[in-house]
Image (tube, rainbow, N blue to C red):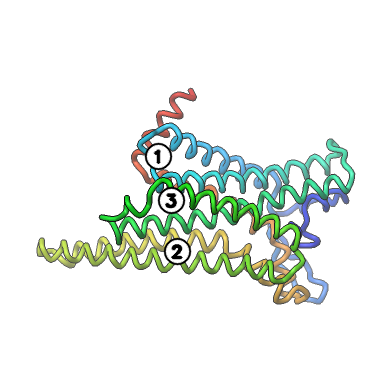
Amino acid sequence: MPVLGSQRRLLGSLNCTPPATFPLTLAPNRTGPQCLEVSIPDGLFLSLGLVSLVENVLVVAAIAKNRNLHSPMYYFICCLAVSDLLVSVSNVLETAVMLLLEAGALAARAAVVQQLDNVIDMLICGSMVSSLCFLGAIAVDRYISIFYALRYHSVVTLPRAWRIIAAIWVASILTSLLFITYYNHTVVLLCLVGFFIAMLALMAVLYVHMLARACQHARGIARLQKRQRPIHQGFGLKGAATLTILLGVFFLCWGPFFLHLSLIVLCPQHPTCGCIFKNFNLFLALIICNAIVDPLIYAFRSQELRKTLQEVLQCSW
């Protein structure tokens, strides 16, 4: 990606630099300390991308097939699947082009590769921003459905949902254009990092508040049934586990990438930061892993969607 200098994968392929042989190595830093460098094999990168691609295509197909799923909540989940699909496609495409260039099967001038790299980087950046936005939109939708249940269908209407979806896609496209055009400006990187922190804070506040309301509701039911402790503890543990998984996966998969962007601004020449920069491909692989996990968290937990997915798979056979 443009902000990474030596980490630009497509342009680096023109030099035909051989990939690292071992998946985990200690790379000496020029200023002294050793760096733990995790090398992601291209085969693994492609495999993760293809798994994510198939998984998210199935989510989109299931939601498109079942009219009962044509609601704002499932439209947000569908758009999240499309965003994750684009993340996977862009990374798989970049890896495939890089391998073809290294093997000499694809002849291209540096200027052509530069343009192709910019297009892929725009696709990656736009899909990442839209993915984060739709994660936030899903959190807000669930929050409204719990705290404003009686007014939910009058607040979250289909026209409003479509406007939100359109606004997110337009904002993602504009963000990717700005990112490619002004990638060497510090303010652009800081805005991306700030956006990630804002989404993380939004999701944490909303989901923690939802968990607190659910526990409060469970306590009320327990008092009526005179079984307060067993229900409250069991429900609280289950809710806390779900919340930990949801926010933990989000932070672990997206956090390293945005830490990378932060360090580019804060300490681009520091030896320790240089060690972190060497693992950029690992951070991209984690984002693809998030695209694999998202359908498991947000889509496949729906019984209606799972039933439709079975029908889609049966029709395909």
Q: Residue 306 carries which label?
A: none
| Residue pointed to by mark 2 | 203
> Picture coordinates of residue 200 (x, y %)?
50, 66
- From the viewer's perspective, is residue 131 above or below residue 185? above
Would residue 126 appear left or right of 98 to someone viewing this image? left
Q: What residue type is labelled 1?
A: His
Q: Which amino acid does label 2 sit on?
A: Met
Image quadrant of residue 235? bottom left
| Residue pointed to by mark 1 | 70
- Residue at disc 1, secondary structure: loop
Kindly report which numbered mark, 1 or 3, lies closer to the viewer in this rendering.
3
> Picture coordinates of residue 66 (x, y %)?
39, 33
Q: What whole-number distance in Å separates the C-alpha atoms at marks 3 and 2?
A: 21 Å
- From the viewer's perspective, is residue 90 above or below residue 145? above
Image quadrant of residue 218? bottom left
> Picture coordinates of residue 225 (x, y %)?
10, 61
Question: Disc 1 or 3, which lies upstream in sequence?
Answer: 1
- Residue at disc 2, secondary structure: helix
Please tell me which residue is depicted at 54% across the width and 53% down the height of the picture: 167
Image quadrant of residue 93? top right
Please tell me which residue is depicted at 87% across the width and 41% down the height of the picture: 108
- Residue at disc 3, secondary structure: helix
| Residue pointed to by mark 3 | 160
Q: Nearer the viewer, residue 264 or 151?
A: 151
| Badge 1 density bin: few <14, some 14–19, many ≥20, Cα 10 Å | some
Please tell me which residue is depicted at 36% across the width and 60% down the height of the picture: 143
- From the viewer's perspective, is residue 284 above or below residue 36? above
Kindly report which numbered mark, 3 or 2, lies closer to the viewer in this rendering.
3
